[in-house]
Amino acid sequence: MKIIKGDNVLVVAGKDRGKKGKVLRVFPKTQRVLVEGVLMRKKHVKPKKGGEKGQTIEQPSSLHISNVEMLCPSCGKGVRLGYKVEGEKKIRICVTCRTAL
């Protein structure tokens, strides 16, 4: 998987198309990502202590990796990723502008 935790991504498909966010978590086995502020679901939480009220909280749900694109800091658009080997290191690059990400 080319997208890792901490990357800024653009959602390209689904009900939240066009939204931008930061990747909070990556699930490589199922090829899904958790993006901050995207695909929010409501969860009902029971009260833990006596006298406390139950509440509804919103938390992000995962979406498939094919529905997000990496945001290039220099282009400012959603782009595909490529790799380039420099010496011993393998770095990710933007396919359109060839800058390191």
Image (cartoon, rainbow, N blue to C red):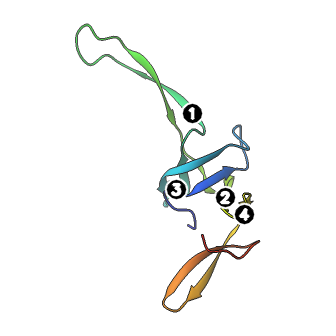
Residue type at the position of mark 1: Met
Q: Position of residue 91 (x, y in %)?
A: 56, 78
Using a 10 Å C-alpha cutoff, classify the residue at mark 2 as few (fewer than 14 neighbours), some (14 to 19) or many (20 or more).
many
Name the mark nearer the viewer: 4 or 1.
4
In this figure, which residue is indicated by the disc labeled 3?
30
Q: Position of residue 58 (x, y in %)?
A: 50, 28
Name the mark nearer the viewer: 3 or 4.
4
In this figure, which residue is indicated by the disc labeled 4?
79
Residue type at the position of mark 2: Leu
Q: Looking at the image, which residue is at 34% across and 11% down?
A: 53
Q: Earlier in the sequence, mark 1 or mark 2?
A: 1
Which mark, by number, is residue 71? 2
In this figure, which residue is indicated by the disc labeled 1?
40
Q: Earlier in the sequence, mark 2 or mark 3?
A: 3
Quarter of the figure that contains the N terminus: bottom right
Distance between the alpha carbons at the discs numbered 4 and 1: 24 Å
Distance between the alpha carbons at the discs numbered 1 and 3: 19 Å
